[in-house]
Image: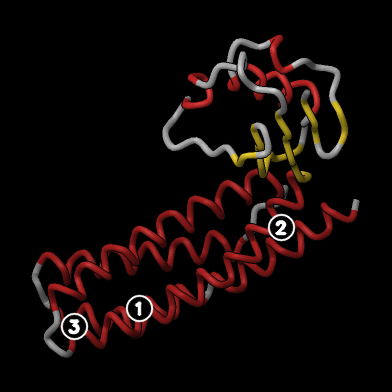
Amino acid sequence: MIVIDGNAAEYNVNAFSNLEELLVKVMEDALEDRVVTDVLVDETQFQEEYPNQAGEVETSSIKRVEIKSVPANEFALGIVAELDKVVALMENSSHHIAGMFRNGQEAEALVLFTELLNVLHDFMGMLAVLRNEYVDAKEELFEKTVEEVSAQFESMGESTSKEDWPALADILDGEFATAVSCWKGVVAIMRGKLENVCEE
């Protein structure tokens, strides 16, 4: 038996050789413009621990698969709500890391600094995907903020290569924190546009 968002589907579990085939077929036929949030196999949560693991799960011993989903727009709106927290985290982290550099904790500060840059990279990537998917117009604030953050990347890279930790601390505490804070406005615009899309 296959259940999709609480409704029994016409498919039979054993008509598919593995779980991946089943999920691909269901997503193609019944989940257009929706995002799968949960897959339960015989009442147990299934989550891939590595790519294509679902292709290794044979359906011969499965009795029931339940798939839960939400509209893609609502899912995106939920992500945008979390991005506010990420901006606050990055802003606070930049001040904290700057303090560590000033206190002579360079090794620990460099580890956190690298993590901060990774978070920022992922954040910008996620925002770019959401903007391309859900926002028609080119947002001037988005472009301007990307430019400001990129400029700080360059300055921080120079300070790091020279191992000029006081200069790096000053950038983190000042221009970088300010540039990161500008993402709040971008996230607010994105949220407003997504809310409009969800109401349509």
Q: Nearer the viewer, residue 121 or 143?
A: 121
Kindly identify the amino acid type of the residue bearing the numbered disc 3. Phe
Q: Which mark is residue 84?
A: none
Label 1 residue SS: helix
Kindly identify the amino acid type of the residue bearing the numbered disc 2. Leu
N-terminal label among 2 and 1 = 2
According to the picture, the residue beneath numbered tag 1 turns out to be 94
Where does the image place residue 2, in percent across and percent down from the top left?
77, 26
Label 2 residue SS: helix
The residue that appears at 66% across and 37% down in the rendered structure is 40
Kindly identify the amino acid type of the residue bearing the numbered disc 1. Ser
The total of numbered circles placed on residues is 3
Q: CA distance from mark 1 to mark 3?
A: 11 Å
The residue that appears at 35% across and 78% down in the rendered structure is 94
Q: CA distance from mark 2 to mark 3?
A: 37 Å
Q: Nearer the viewer, residue 91 or 162?
A: 91
Q: CA distance from mark 2 to mark 1?
A: 26 Å
Where does the image place residue 165, in percent across and percent down from the top left?
15, 79
Does 86 sit left or right of 65 as displayed?
left
Within the image, what quadrant is residue 23 found in?
Answer: top right
According to the picture, the residue beneath numbered tag 3 turns out to be 101
The residue that appears at 26% across and 63% down in the rendered structure is 114
According to the picture, the residue beneath numbered tag 2 turns out to be 77
Where does the image place residue 108, in percent across and percent down from the top left?
18, 74
